[in-house]
Image (tube, helix red, strand yellow):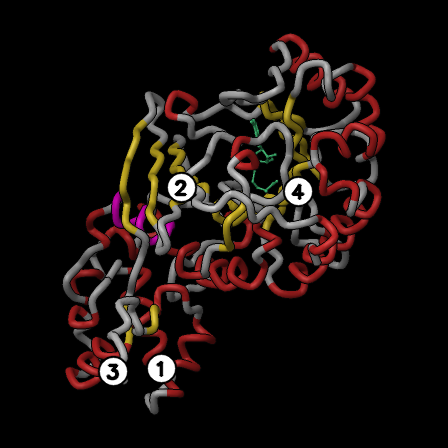
Amino acid sequence: MTLLPDIKSTKVNLLGYDLAHMKAFFTEIGEKPFRAVQVLKWIHQFGADDFTQMSNVSQSLRNRLSDIAEIRAPEIVAEQKASDGTIKWLMRLDGGNSIETVFIPEDNRGTLCVSSQVGCALDCGFCSTAKQGFNRNLTSAEIIAQLWVANRALNPLAQLKDEAQSKHGKVQDSKNRVITNVVLMGMGEPLLNFDNVVEAIHLMLEDHAYGLSKRRVTISTAGVVPALKRLREECDVSLAISLHAPNDAIRNKIVPLNKKYPIKELLEACQYYFSGDTKKKQFTIEYVMLAGINDSEKNARELASLLKKLPCKINLIPFNPFPDSDFDCSKMQTINRFKDILYKAGYVAVIRKTRGDDIDAACGQLAGKVKDKSRRIKLDKMN
Ligand code: SAH
């Protein structure tokens, strides 16, 4: 019997390997672990996608790597630029799905909003990604690729031909970095794709890769409590909690995950996340403003008393509408009143500026293309 050649690549994709994984790879192929640092730098600092570019790696090893490995990222299939400078990329993944990644430029920083899953299983009623259903987790390569691809698109100097030249490149110079912050606030629930998200974050923090500080990488979660506890042990980056309600009755309706992990458990997990570390400052509470649902003065006072003992600031997010959404955004006057009540109670509360809404790049508007939408995880199957 003859076997048909496998058209799928059989090469290992090194794009998503963190330092430990890369060292293990080189050890396994009988090479010295220091090669891991060289290759990481080429891939992530100089944007290399081809082993032949790696001029400080011996010719024979370059040839060998070209035979067995690859550096493969999703392809950009569409790029849209909003009037405020926000850029949204649609990237096509293996298997026909696609995801969206958004770059938000501001005066003193550039934030990349990264997706962690194809679609989302959580079914929050006010989120358009939820309406897409869930297909699969992204690999660590697909997660870090969003940063790698965006860096190359925003900063062509990253694609340098050799290391000597790259010393003068922008990517080397942290002051000129275009992407200074990463938020895992795109499609998906990052803590339901724990291992791949953590490996990609290791690369974001790794000095030989992107070298971002922990404070500049933020995981946003609807509150997967056991995973929050694990995260504290494995990589304690900044945290944003999608709370959106001051009590369980309201939250059960808009964030179904609350039925599994109610507010009290969630806030205890947040407190634990920050316990014993005085360097970590505070976390962010995200609160989407939905007219007539969670935006009354009573709700604001309830929220203030709920968060009393926690080191947090509050981001009020005006609801971004999408086709067939069942909600309306609160009036600006209501949002301001809500903010004032929190402010008077001693909180730092800010109204999140909506960015990129003319290209559907704002919070909760990312949809991508989810092939099989039926794979909604049952809440009782979650870890
Ligand atoms: N699953 C994660 C991250 C993705 S959503 C989480 O729940 O945190 C990123 C943020 O955008 C979350 O706070 C989410 O609740 C909010 N969001 C979702 N849909 C929105 C919408 N239509 N308008 C405004 N914010 C929205």
Q: Which residue is mark 4?
A: 222
> Mark 4: which amino acid?
Ala
Q: Secondary structure at mark 1?
A: helix
Q: Which residue is mark 2?
A: 101
How many neighbours does mark 4 have within 10 angstroms: few (below 14), some (14-19), or many (20 or more)? many
* Magenta span of residues: 146-154
Residue lying at 66% horizontally and 29% vertically, measured from the top left: 287
**152 in magenta:** yes
Residue on which disc 3 sits: 2
> Where does the image place residue 251, in percent across and percent down from the top left?
76, 32
Give the label, 1 or 2, closer to the camera.
2
**Which quadrant does the C terminus fall into?**
bottom right
Q: Is mark 4 within 8 Å of ligand 1?
A: yes
Name which residue lies at 79% across and 15% down.
297
Would residue 174 appear left or right of 244 to someone viewing this image? left
Per the image, the residue denoted by label 1 is 34
Q: Is residue 313 left or right of residue 272?
A: left
Measured Cα–Cα span from mark 1 to mark 3: 41 Å
Task: Choose the circle earlier in sequence order: 4 or 2.
Answer: 2
C-alpha gap between disc 1 and disc 4: 39 Å
Q: Find out whether the residues at labels 1 and 3 contact each other: C-beta distance under 8 Å.
A: no
- 107 or 152: which is nearer to us? 152
Q: Is residue 61 above or below residue 110?
A: below
Magenta stretch: helix, strand or loop mostly: helix
